Amino acid sequence: MKKGFLSSLILLVCTVLLLCSGCGIKAENDKSKPAYRVTDATGTVVEFTGKPQKIVSMGTGSDEILLALVTPERIAALTYLADDAGISAISAQAKAIKGRVQRNNLESILSYAPDLVIVPDWGGIDFVGQLRAANVKVYVHKTPNTLEDIKANIGELAGLVGEQEHGQALQQQMDDRLAAIWTKVGKIKPEQRKKIVALSFMGPMGIKGSSFDDMCRYANIVNAIEHLDVPKNATFSEEQMLMLDPDIILVPSWDYSGTKNTGEFKRQVMTNEAYQGIKAIRSHQVVQVHDKYLYSTSQYAVNAVEELAEVSYPESVSYTHLTLPTIA
């Protein structure tokens, strides 16, 4: 009987040891499995065993979103435009990050040994292929055209870097600020809405469905060219401007090339003899907002909505935290 008991005890001990050994193998295997996976705009699945710690951003939009989601220590490099206060909303915060990358410079990017490179969908599929061929994890994101698109992109990038809660908070902040704007401008009657034309150095901006068109909707102003068939970067004729007769003309506050004078551009618009009967000229409403907000594809696009609302309805809207640019 003792012999049978001893045999049973030995069998039990062996079984427990085997089970424990099996658990150990399972735990070890789990460590090699991805903690999470995401699918980018190209349909590529990107897997992570942990939150990325050496991120490279290839777009100003992702620069701005990332700095609201993660600590600077997790960002290896930003775009070369991150330091340009004329187009980057995070030029001050960017000083905490030393790395900068030029567009499509493979050697520069690889020098940071990144564990994630974030590329906008206009970045070039061939270059993305080069990065992936070098065994770099690349996430391609869609370029937002509306504020809802921006919120969706924030959610995607938050999931990408493992910071979903921060992403949700950022989305909520956008919603709260947009709602606050609407409480000030939403009561303006359709016939009292201001009509605006936005000009860039390359021509009019803001065709229907563009980010500027969407900003106008949130600011309750009329984008004067939304129904015009104006090709991208097309010349805007004097006849078209006279026909539109806008209440406000928006002019650039920044130039990518650094060779054009924004003040001179305004003066040319103001002194154009053909424009002297236009409402915006007669009421001295040729104005600027910050292009770093106007062209933003991040949470900072809400700043542009605030500025557009303020220049359009100064009697109803005033933001003490905003300082509109001035033209010399």
Image (cartoon, rainbow, N blue to C red):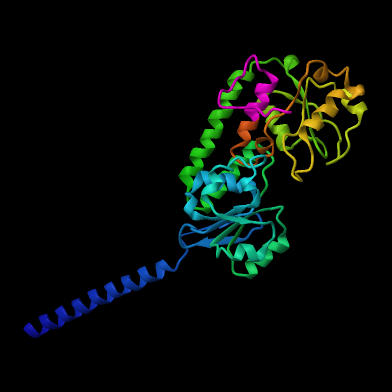
State whether residue 129 is above or below residue 179.
Answer: below
State whether residue 3 is above or below residue 203.
Answer: below
Q: Is residue 37 left or right of residue 149?
A: left
- From the top left corner, tell me how far across and down residue 8 is, in percent: 15, 79
Residue 232 among magenta residues: no
- 309 or 275: nearer the eye? 275
Point out the stretch of residues depicted in magenta: 305-328
* Quadrant of image for the C terminus: top right
Which residue is located at x 56 percent, y 47 percent? 94
- From the top left corner, tell me how far across and down residue 225 is, in percent: 82, 30
Q: In the rendered image, which quarter is residue 211 located in? A: top right
- From the top left corner, tell me how far across and down residue 15 is, in percent: 24, 76
- 209 or 104: nearer the eye? 104
- 239 or 259: nearer the eye? 259
Which residue is located at x 87 percent, y 26 percent? 241
Q: Is residue 204 visible?
A: yes
Residue situated furthest left in the rendering: 2
Which residue is located at x 63 percent, y 63 percent? 108
Residue situated furthest bottom in the rendering: 3
Q: Is residue 206 visible?
A: no
* Quadrant of image for the N terminus: bottom left
